[in-house]
Image: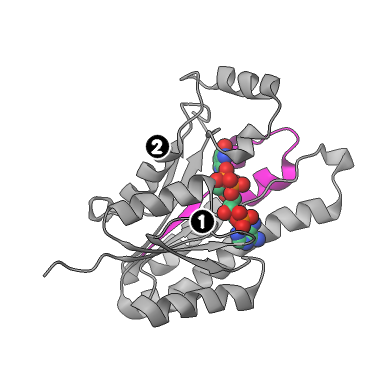
Amino acid sequence: MTEPGRVVLVTGGSRGIGLGIARAFAALGDRVAVTYKSKPPEDANLVALKADVTSDDEVDAAFAAVEERWGPVEVLVANAGITRDGLLLRMGESDFGDVVDTNLTGAYRCAKRAAGPMVRARTGRMIFVSSVAGLAGSAGQANYAASKAGLVGLARSIARELARRNITANVVAPGPVETDMTDALPEARRNELAASVPLGRFATIDEVAAAVTFLASSQAASITGAVLPVDGGLGMGH
Ligand code: NAP
């Protein structure tokens, strides 16, 4: 009899990069749940759970649902994220706070909820989806870049705290990726962004997913506290 796959939870897995990551784990034979805020994904291979990462209760309920079905989450991918772009002088406090609450505090809520069972199991993988913007900064995205930079400190602190329990925490930092988030940009801005990437193009969702599944694999067992860029060279030196 074959072993059942790992229990994987991907936040914000209803579309875009999160859906691609979830499908990549499912293709490896893992048991994959995704959280979403508004609309579930149409994919029979994934268990979809409505859970807003800004709500402690909803995060707890999503983990409880996974535990009841398959047991504790073994791989957490904190991917849910939003943007509310604007120049600093015009950025309202709610635009700043909402982005940090979703992208950074949301990841903290999920990591904290995942950590207890992982500590008891003495194994676990956490992967945080950050951005090149968090390392290099990004004009018009002070809120987003701050939240994404925060994920590096969060992951590295978790990596140090939980290393002796065989739990790793790593960050994937994509540059521009072909998704709804970047499709929404004006064409001129998209061309400008692609031209700024040394490889001259956006990354694909599959390329980001491959980095995430690698960090969750047994081959990556000695990698913790790392930031793995998937950015065509855009963030080199940061
Ligand atoms: P996307 O297409 O906009 O999808 C975002 C996902 O997050 C959706 O599943 C959305 O759920 C979910 N989400 C948003 N707010 C949530 C909340 N409060 N609670 C739970 N789920 C929530 O984004 P994407 O482009 O795939 O980006 C995914 C991640 O990669 C983000 O963290 C983003 O910052 C990062 N990233 C993206 C790029 C890029 O070029 N696209 C580059 C670097 C980093 P609903 O569909 O239900 O709203």
Q: How dense is the environment of label 2, judged by Cα within 10 Å: few (below 14), some, or many (20 and up)?
A: some
Residue 233 spot, x, y in % from top left:
47, 26
Provide the secondary structure element on which disc 1 rests: loop
Give residue 8's quadrant in the image. Answer: bottom left
Residue at 71%, 26% in the rendered image: 186
Residue 17 spot, x, y in % from top left:
50, 45
Q: What residue span does the magenta drawing correspond to?
A: 125-149
Q: How many marks are shown on the rendered structure?
A: 2
Instruction: Name the side, left or right, on which 46 lies relative to 2.
Output: right
Residue 41 marker:
1
> Label 2, on which residue?
207
Residue 101 marker:
none
Q: Nearer the viewer, residue 75 or 222?
A: 75
Pointers 1 and 2 in contact (C-beta within 8 Å): no
Label 1 to label 2: alpha-carbon separation = 20 Å
Residue 132 in sight in this render: no
Give residue 132's quadrant in the image. Answer: top right
Give residue 122's quadrant in the image. Answer: bottom left
Among the two numbered marks 1 and 2 on one chain, the one whose residue lies closer to the N terminus:
1
